[in-house]
Amino acid sequence: MSWLVDVEFRSSKVDGMGVFARRAIRSGTRLWQFDESMHVCDSNALAGLDDRDLAYALHGGYLHGPSDKFLWYRDGMQFMNHADGEMANVGLGFWPELRQDHCVALRDIAAGEELFEDYSFWADAGLDPRHWLHPFYMRQGRRHYHFLRGLERQPVAA
């Protein structure tokens, strides 16, 4: 299992299901990390999925920027909802190697609190019409594609 802290998955007031801390989590705690249950895909692997699995993968997965591999999973991470900037309590802010990918608590998180990641760090990866992932979004993930497109990174003021 890729979760390193005690979480539960239940209805979110933000969108669908969410990830909630069962116990308090200290800032800096590693919450989730890559493990061998993840599906690591290139264009050929995604092309081999049926439409239902492809839609599921695109909605809950992400493109690992440095490796150009698409990761998806069924461990509950697909229920992590988005929050902008300082509202996010989960993230990382840099790309580790693929098999070292993980996220941490960005601040102390109370028991019962929903976990939110700012997707804008990674959301623009693969959205360019010239990228190999783009046709998959157009085939089975248009709604999520447009959501991610709306999160494209804005320049950070110095």
Image: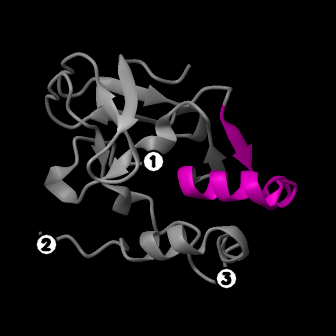
> Quadrant of residue 131 in the image?
bottom right
| Whether residue 96 is visible | no
Residue indicated by mark 3: 130
Q: What's the CA distance linking mark 1 and mark 3? A: 22 Å
Q: Position of residue 132 (x, y in %)?
A: 72, 71
User: The N terminus lies in which quarter of the figure?
Assistant: top right
> CB under 8 Å between callouts 1 and 2?
no
Q: Is residue 66 magenta?
A: no
Q: Position of residue 50 (x, y in %)?
A: 83, 56
Magenta residues?
Answer: 38-60
Q: Nearer the viewer, mark 1 or mark 3?
A: 3
x 11%, y 69%: residue: 158
Q: Nearer the viewer, residue 38 or 102?
A: 38
x 28%, y 53%: residue: 14
x 64%, y 52%: residue: 56
Above-or-below relation of 42 to 28: below
Q: Judging from the image, what secondary structure is the residue with disc 1 in?
A: loop
x 35%, y 53%: residue: 15
Q: Among all residues in the image, which is located at the extreme bottom?
A: 129
- Residue type, numbered disc 1: Trp
Q: Is residue 58 magenta?
A: yes
Residue indicated by mark 1: 95
- Residue type, numbered disc 2: Ala
- Which colouring convention does the figure follow? one colour
Q: What's the CA distance linking mark 1 and mark 2? A: 21 Å
Q: Judging from the image, what secondary structure is the residue with disc 2 in?
A: loop
Residue indicated by mark 2: 157
